[in-house]
Amino acid sequence: MSELRDLYQEVILDHSKRPRNFRVIDDASHSAKGHNPLCGDRLSLTLKVEDDRIADAAFQGDGCAISKASASIMTDAIKGHSVAEARQLFGTMHDMLTGKGEVELPEEFDKLAVFGGVRDYPVRVKCATLPWHTMVAALDGAAQPAKTE
Ligand code: ZN
């Protein structure tokens, strides 16, 4: 188990040092900003949704290793999936991070399991969930102009 933990830490460290999708989508269809005052994490998420599918996802921002790694892995994970699948994944991640029993991650999303250990650190849970909350805010805000909060 501790070896697994080490591996998970390595993945998180790698994604926080070299975040994937760290950019702005110029012709984004959805966007939202997220802020976790508890830790000071800030991120700005842009999505390009085409035919109800997330064609592209990117983020920029500044925050702790957990929040950056979570945004990096999330943007990778949701790309190519439908909006409904992304929303469902938010629910799964939320349950996993807040420790609501055992959570079964679909095989294609097994990378997200690296955040399973975060629930043991309640202060860090919001860092990991921030990108997911921001994604839902972006998807919900489609009909309105992007808000800054
Ligand atoms: Zn944080």
Image (cartoon, rainbow, N blue to C red):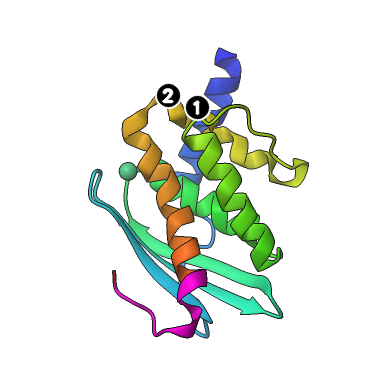
Classify mark 1: residues with Cα within 10 Å, few (<14), some (14-19) or many (20+).
some
Which residue is labeled 1 in the image?
117
Residue 32 image position (x, y, % from top left): 40, 70
Asked if residue 18 lies left or right of residue 127, the reply is: right
Which residue is labeled 2 in the image?
120
Q: Residue shown at 57%/34% (left/top)?
A: 114
Query: Marks 2 and 1: in contact by CB < 8 Å?
Result: yes
Amino acid at pointer 1: Gly
Residue 94 image position (x, y, % from top left): 51, 43
Q: For the residue labelled by badge 2, is the local secondary structure a helix, a strand or a loop?
A: helix
Asked if residue 29 lies left or right of residue 86, the reply is: left
Residue extending furthest toward the right:
107
Q: Quadrant of ligand 1?
A: top left
Q: Residue shown at 36%/35% (left/top)?
A: 124
The quadrant in which the C terminus is found is bottom left
Residue 77 image position (x, y, % from top left): 64, 54
Is 48 covered by the magenta stretch?
Answer: no
Q: Which mark is residue 78?
A: none
Q: Residue shown at 47%/70% (left/top)?
A: 138
Q: Quadrant of residue 78?
A: bottom right
Tell me which segment is drawn in magenta: 139-148
Asked if residue 64 lies left or right of residue 78, the reply is: left
Q: Quadrant of residue 88?
A: bottom right
| Residue 17 appears in the rendering | no
- CA–CA distance in space, label 1 to label 2: 6 Å
